[in-house]
Image (cartoon, coloured by chain):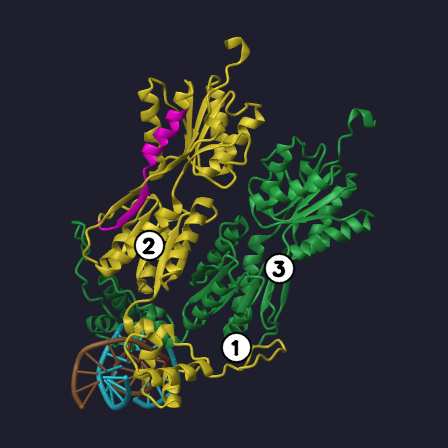
Chain colours: A green, B yellow, C cyan, D brown
Amino acid sequence: MPSSGIGFMNPPSRRVRIDDIAKLAGVSSATVSRVISGARPVSESTRERVLATAQHFGYQPSQLARNLRRGRAATVGVLVSDIENAHFATMVRAIEEALYARGTRVLFCNTGEDTAKQSSYLEVMAAERVMGVVISPTPEGDSAVSRLMDLGTPVVAIDRPVSDPRADSVVTDNAVAMAKGTQLLVDSGRRHIGWIGRDSVWTNSERLAGYRSAVELAGLQPITAVSDFTVQGGYLAAEMLLDDHPDLDGLVISNNHMTIGALQALRARGILVSDRMGVVAFDDPPWASLVDPPLTTVAQPIWGMANAAVDRLFMRIADISLPPEQICVECQLQIRASSQIRRKSPNEE
Amino acid sequence: MPSSGIGFMNPPSRRVRIDDIAKLAGVSSATVSRVISGARPVSESTRERVLATAQHFGYQPSQLARNLRRGRAATVGVLVSDIENAHFATMVRAIEEALYARGTRVLFCNTGEDTAKQSSYLEVMAAERVMGVVISPTPEGDSAVSRLMDLGTPVVAIDRPVSDPRADSVVTDNAVAMAKGTQLLVDSGRRHIGWIGRDSVWTNSERLAGYRSAVELAGLQPITAVSDFTVQGGYLAAEMLLDDHPDLDGLVISNNHMTIGALQALRARGILVSDRMGVVAFDDPPWASLVDPPLTTVAQPIWGMANAAVDRLFMRIADISLPPEQICVECQLQIRASSQIRRKSPNEE
DNA sequence: CTGAAAGCGCTTACAG
DNA sequence: CTGAAAGCGCTTACAG
């Protein structure tokens, strides 16, 4: 099977099939199948002969035929809302690694928070007869999830739950974690703590609730600004808050992209973080410890979530009748300088 | 097809097949196939009846059967080296969108620069009979690419070329662009311009060559430090350069993760960018315009690359005998403050 | 425009 | 341990 080397593709030399190998090795195709898949015992001598023949002729079993025969693809659908967000990029990487370790392929979709695209892809998943789906669902319209589950395909929601009660889900303790993060600022003496995030997304509603509970418990007023999950959104939300609340001395930010924007807004106004403004951010990107001052964050255990989701998916594939489970994993506070006790200025002494 | 709502999966009610629809609509399965695929004309009345029946019974044609029959999956393999790098995250998003628009699925793999994993996945691609592969290859050992192409599967290299001359490739003009970026610093009067990047990766060798040509043309000494594509790597490389060259007044950085680290190193030493140190960075992440001072960058046309790669792949699928093409797209200099003319300090006047 | 029939390349009871 | 045979669910020449 030499390469032409001239730059053109080779003639489409007919692919070698299981029957070819069988004939050449002097056995039946059933035996070749058993050797290749390792599903059943085959005598050692036959095994070696078949393997050698297959190797020699570069036999690549057709996954297409295998899939049709088995009625299932060796594939899991992975749908995320925004692969350009480091949170989901890490999640996709972790899911892919977990699936790769199990010999399973990833059918990938970036929904971009587009419910129509999500529905369309979920139909693709049905047509492709995937083993299951891991999905970080768009906020609206997940009836396509139910239709897929009606067909018997397991669905595990990750990051955000889906409304269908039959789906398993893996989420973090957003509200509790955000409350703890907010509490750090309360404990360091801040009295005017603002919240920046997005509405209409489950994770952010939870985080907002956590923030509210912490400030209200401390007898403080909630101060909130919502925008979208972008650097620009964070910048604008921070400006809004700073304009309306000159006495703001703490800031809780609900998303990593927004955090970049909010920090830029603070710098643009010459407001020093941890000195005049305590900051706690949700998500722990690689640069969090490198900014000045290092950022206190709420780190989500992304690898843990991904592994839990894949584990759960395979448990359900093994036993479809399992009762659905809501798995909640704990976030971890990464306490760094940005939330530290406020230095009193000389005239406050 | 009601959901149980109790939390258990439904009984695995047998899936409706093409024969079921055919029988129910009073036609042959061939006709149903023609209606569903739209491949051949069918009388309007029959068409409507079939469509209504299919709809009513929630018929989802098996892609598995279709694939086997056609000998190809409606899928393209996408292999990238690091999905956690914003460069590749954007690329994967763009590729996925281009493929989605063509009704094609993405089989996703994050190789993590692991040649063994890459080879293993390329065999999966062969087994899955994908239409083609778009790959950002690992530096070493792409013989698996040749084996896949021997089987007649088109491969388009993106970002970095592969050694097999039969593959198409889409890359940027790394060397020229880096030379232009370096020239900006030369023009602003810098005389000691350092380069930070990684060795043994094609893109970075090109960029290094571009940097070298620009400094040598200006009669300056090349000053280089290599490390890996991480924030930490960039930090360490910058420290090395600063330790060894106290008179360093310009810095060219070859990768976005390394840029974060290098900027942190500068800040840690109190070195003001654009004042004492001109900086130009390869890759144009969303935060480039938001750092202080805004960063001059070499922006790669990622969407353009992705679209060119997918276009090229489909051209080759349509005509396998096309001579291979090396497509080179131009980078765009984003000139911002970090490369600006150096302010002379008072005692230099 | 439509149907009967073959076949894509495997896997897996079934029988020995 | 091994083989003959059926069948997974489509699509597509072929014939009409």
Q: Which residues are magenta?
A: B166-184
Kindly state the secondary structure of the residue where label 1 is placed: helix
Kindly state the secondary structure of the residue where label 3 is placed: strand
Nearer the camera: disc 1 or disc 2:
2
Give the residue at x 34% y 36%: B174
Q: Using the numbered discs, state the Cα–Cα distance from disc 1 to disc 3 in whole angstroms.
A: 23 Å
Give the residue at x 19% y 51%: B323
Q: Using the numbered discs, state the Cα–Cα distance from disc 2 to disc 3 in whole angstroms.
A: 35 Å
Image quadrant in which you'd find residue B196: top left
Pointer 1 chain: A
Disc 1: CA contacts within 10 A as few (<14), some (14-19) or many (>=20)? many
In this figure, which residue is indicated by the disc labeled 3?
A171
In the image, residue A21 lies in the stretch drawn in magenta: no
The image position of residue B36, as x and y in percent, is: 35, 77
Q: Earlier in the sequence, mark 1 or mark 3?
A: 1
Residue furthest front in the image:
B44
Q: In the drawing, what numbered circle is on residue B310?
A: 2
Q: Amino acid at mark 1?
A: Asp
Q: In the drawing, what numbered circle is on residue A150?
A: 1
The image position of residue B330, as x and y in percent, is: 33, 39
Disc 3: CA contacts within 10 A as few (<14), some (14-19) or many (>=20)? many
The image position of residue A56, as x and y in percent, is: 22, 62
Relative depth, front residue between A32 and B224 = B224
Kindly state the secondary structure of the residue where label 2 is placed: helix
In the image, residue B171 lies in the stretch drawn in magenta: yes
Q: Amino acid at mark 2?
A: Val
Q: Amino acid at mark 3?
A: Val
Give the residue at x 46% y 80%: B58
The answer to whether the residues at label 2 and label 3 have Cβ atoms under 8 Å apart is no
The reply to whether label 1 and label 3 mark residues of one chain is yes
Give the residue at x 38% y 56%: B98
